[in-house]
Image: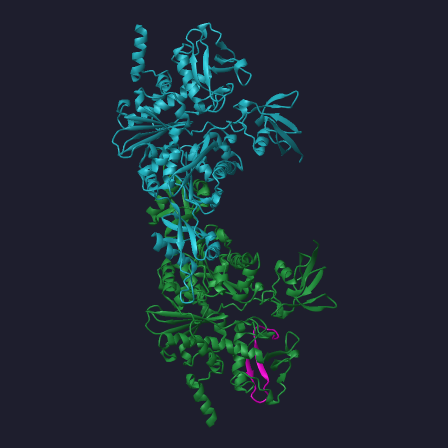
Chain colours: A cyan, B green
Amino acid sequence: MSTYQVTFLPDNVTTAVCGGASLLHAARAAGVDLNSPCGGKGTCGKCAVRIGESSYTDALACRTEVHCDLTVEIPAEARMKKQKVLLSEKQLDEDGLWRRYKMDPIAGKYHLTLPAPDLADSMNDLDRLLKALKKEHGIEAAGISLNCLREFPEAVREGGFEVTVTVVESGGRCEIIGVTPGLDEKPAYGAAVDIGTTTVVCAICDLKTGKVIDREGSYNRQASFGADVITRIIHADENKEGLSELKEAAVSTINSLIEALTERNGLDRGDIVSMVCGGNTVMTHLFFGVTPKYLRLEPYIPATVSFPQVKAADIGIDIHRDAPVLAIPSVASYVGGDITAGVFAIMPGGSEEINLFIDVGTNGELVLGNCEWLVTCSCSAGPAFEGSGVSSGMRAMDGAVDRIEIDRESLRADCGVIGDTKPVGVCGSGLICALSEMLAAGVIDRAGKIRTDKGNDCIRVRDEAEYLLIQSEESGTGSDITITESDVKNLLRAKAAVFAGIRTMLAQVHMDVSDIANVYIAGGFGSNINITDAVQIGMLPDLPEEKYEYVGNSCIKGAILGLLSKEALAAMDGLAGRMTYIELSIGNQFMEEFISALFIPHTDLGLFPSLQQAGQKQGKE
Amino acid sequence: MSTYQVTFLPDNVTTAVCGGASLLHAARAAGVDLNSPCGGKGTCGKCAVRIGESSYTDALACRTEVHCDLTVEIPAEARMKKQKVLLSEKQLDEDGLWRRYKMDPIAGKYHLTLPAPDLADSMNDLDRLLKALKKEHGIEAAGISLNCLREFPEAVREGGFEVTVTVVESGGRCEIIGVTPGLDEKPAYGAAVDIGTTTVVCAICDLKTGKVIDREGSYNRQASFGADVITRIIHADENKEGLSELKEAAVSTINSLIEALTERNGLDRGDIVSMVCGGNTVMTHLFFGVTPKYLRLEPYIPATVSFPQVKAADIGIDIHRDAPVLAIPSVASYVGGDITAGVFAIMPGGSEEINLFIDVGTNGELVLGNCEWLVTCSCSAGPAFEGSGVSSGMRAMDGAVDRIEIDRESLRADCGVIGDTKPVGVCGSGLICALSEMLAAGVIDRAGKIRTDKGNDCIRVRDEAEYLLIQSEESGTGSDITITESDVKNLLRAKAAVFAGIRTMLAQVHMDVSDIANVYIAGGFGSNINITDAVQIGMLPDLPEEKYEYVGNSCIKGAILGLLSKEALAAMDGLAGRMTYIELSIGNQFMEEFISALFIPHTDLGLFPSLQQAGQKQGKE
């Protein structure tokens, strides 16, 4: 078979592919970041590229086969840029988080001085080591890893019977995984990882001080196989190598983060001796190489919610080969370890107050309860808030519109853009804001219909009715950025799912919105939401703004806690087991609530008293 | 670099090697069994081959480099033939052995019928499995192996929620390692392996009935790197790939046995779900890929006596990839797991009688004691009994002289040979017999000096004084088979080491030969020894013959017990820890005993009263 050279611009990266391969495949092979939310099905249109140099053709990369040498330019809007990863000051307060728990990590380093053997004291090396470990540090280790066993006799002698050992706990037993000669004063490090569908974040902790020494985030490389979990499940199921591609994509994303972090901080990758990760149930299945197929088919059964502790080398993570890798347990198919970790880190365990925890992404995961009980559910919000299913949608990265103000007279929009660049699309928080403003300015009615009767240039009908947000000359794509009536419908469905989830869950425990003491908004997307806008469109309940708190990446906080404290790990295991999962697809309640919520803010305005009052006030003025 | 073709006859196997490689290397590469007790140092002369077809040259394979295409004939005496492996009826009584212990193997298969999930019962697959396992079989498994986790959701559905699971115990926790659809009535099997320096034996057991279904033995492929443990330690230490070559040789020996056994019995290798092995400390180190270097250097420290339980795939054993592989713990550097297993299987644990357990190979391993105490030591007998260090020595295989009678007048020897073939050498039991007969016939004196003053054709002086055992025309090698004065000295040292070991150990516990109730002779070599001869030459103590019992391959019996009973495994762990190791190189006692034993039977004839009486009787006649 012939092979051809494909050069990607502006990166100027060239790769060779077999004739007939798609350009998307070539981009993956070249390591070029190309957006493909639908996973290469040709349905989302996000991977549009320009082929040729002087005269060019526009084409979808996933639908274009390579049959000659090509030069391909990836326009700004088709690139997966560096995510706006949450690294604000507010986020770094997790340094102090572990102080709520006993500092007792599953991995640590210990210095030992062994008595040298002689003919009268011919105890074997391992027992000598275990005895000293118990005597000097009170640690009763049960054994040694095979890799370490093969090397430690040399290390013991090289150090003149003075050594530093690395001990990890696995299934309740302590195991020696490293022996270095002499006194090794370098601390042992651990990696806490949040495996998000969109973004992966890794924090490196000093296991002695508990300090987070650095963190780094990037988009999840699985994104090139599809933006949302369902597309990825389908990719894993329908392609022979699909599952292993997705597994490798997650692993290589994490390995790249670890590489960047270790290089920046002058560490060896082998210095990282434990890893705790959190992710939604699909991400965790894919990371462990377990088919997520049955998560998508009714009755939506996960292979497991509690993954086995494995060794880093067994799963391809490039840290100490025998480092334990643990996943925080999930609750159910669509309430994952990220939620367990987040709730553990954020909701004060001892309080009797009723709290609501919300993590909105493709799914809205909701947890309600207090120290005595917890219920949880997942409402399929759809990928609208994550930039998929909306014509101008994109993730929160450079070039994304995240704030919109519509002049009530001219109906022209004034947009805030992330980064020092021209706008190329609208991210989730921008879309919520857009919906709120479009209603307030009368661009849409309460049912989400675009009011083409307005007689304004910003409202027009092309394939369908649409609102012109940004004109081509001001746009980074060279085309108009618009919000169509279909976009509005998709956004309505997304916000309705979240609100209906909250209402259904409250009803199950015979409570009302007013019983909620605090609402914690988690996740990268959550931190960008304007609460007022979200209440205005009827996505979040009408509660005083001071009851809302942005908690940022709560998953990584829980993972850090797990890394630093066995007690925290055990508590998270217990927590996952204690949460009662409510399956929303049983019965009609959720569907009824959903339909009622497909208006802005809701068919029952009584649920939004503050908006009603504001409306009455406005009406009176 | 040029490569050349080397063809080995009579096998007619051809291999390609790089120019400059040794013929021994080529033979290993071709999988041709060539004797090389010294491990390729050119010192033992056992790898003599004939190069060329019509006109040929004699050469040592290990000293001959390949610089052109060659045809090489391996003469009978240089071939490692199939060992005379102990498979007698008496040996097979281990079928009933486990009945002394609770039948409770570390691995087993269980049939389960799971309730099918629905929206109202959406418990994950793994918890569903664990719950049924507990309910139906009372087994509380802690988890599942990563490999099995990746596959079992499909198996569960393929079987319509009826499955057969394989559960193993590892470090006190039960783990599921296999899930097959439906009712799988094939039993789970285990492999018990005796990793001997010379011979490896594997027995396959049905883990449900406890029955040994088949067994097979072969020489240890490590033999081509040296006949004895010391040569192999040196090979591992002095060659870059030495350790891994020896590890692979042991593993491939076991894998070949398993292949033969599974094929013969119509099993899949994956049906074997556990393995328990016993071997001396050096063999165990090599099998696990751990350097045995410090076992050879004073103060002779093993890396460990208790090896970690590993998974078959991690060590290269070709059975179920997640099958636990356990080694029976050693006591000390030169008292290995084979002795722990043997003593456990053979010495009745509850008796107060003092028993002596002897396993004679290169080292003589001795255990003395009763239900309350046990002492053990290792006396370096040297490789004389194993065919090394004796000019005509060989292992007990086809062509080996194992019985000798010397006519008191003519001094001509009448020899018994193993197999239907001409004699090519003398094995250990033959050498003991020879020594006894040579003394009785007056060929040697009590100090081992050959009596050249006899004026008999069978006694002659070439390089040194020698006794002609078999003339060239009757020999399978075409040369005379003789026993030289150096051979006799080597044999005297070997037998003296054993006897001195027994005496030193008895002295340590303030006992005498007469306190011994039973003597158990273990090992392949042991079973061939003629007790009368061994007492005659002063190797074994002068006790009534009925106190002696041949126990054959006691190591495999212990390994089988371990395979079938967790209780037995735990008891062997305890036993290894309870045995007090006596280091014979401390103090002068052993050396004094050794020097006194360098006569036949001994300098102190009072230690051999029955021989003294016989002598007196003879004198009187």
Q: Is residue A32 visible?
A: yes
| Residue B361 shows in this picture | no
Is residue B403 or residue B536 the one in the foreground?
B536
Q: Is residue B545 magenta?
A: no
Magenta part mainly helix, strand or loop?
Answer: loop
> Does residue A325 lie above or below B401 as drawn?
above
Q: Quadrant of residue A607?
A: top left
Looking at the picture, how far across and down is residue B37, in whole percent? Answer: 58, 67
Residue B458 lies, with reference to residue B96, above or below; the image says below
- Image spot of residue A574 (x, y percent): 32, 39
Horizontal arrangement in the rendering, residue A352 relative to residue A58 (left or right):
left
Q: Residue extending furthest bottom?
A: B620
Q: Percent position (x, y) of residue B10?
A: 66, 65
The image quarter in which residue A5 lies = top right
Which segment is the magenta one? Answer: B404-423
Quadrant of the drawing holding the N terminus of chain A = top right
In the picture as drawn, the residue positioned furthest to the left comes out as: A352
The number of numbered badges drawn on the structure is 0
User: Residue furthest toward the right?
Assistant: B54
Q: Is residue B413 magenta?
A: yes
The picture quadrant where one finds residue A128 is bottom left
Vertical order, B289 against A229 (above or below): below
Can you say whether B315 is above or below B147 in the image?
below
Position of residue B474 in the picture relative to residue A577 (left or right): right
Q: Residue at x 38, y 61 (%)?
A: B573
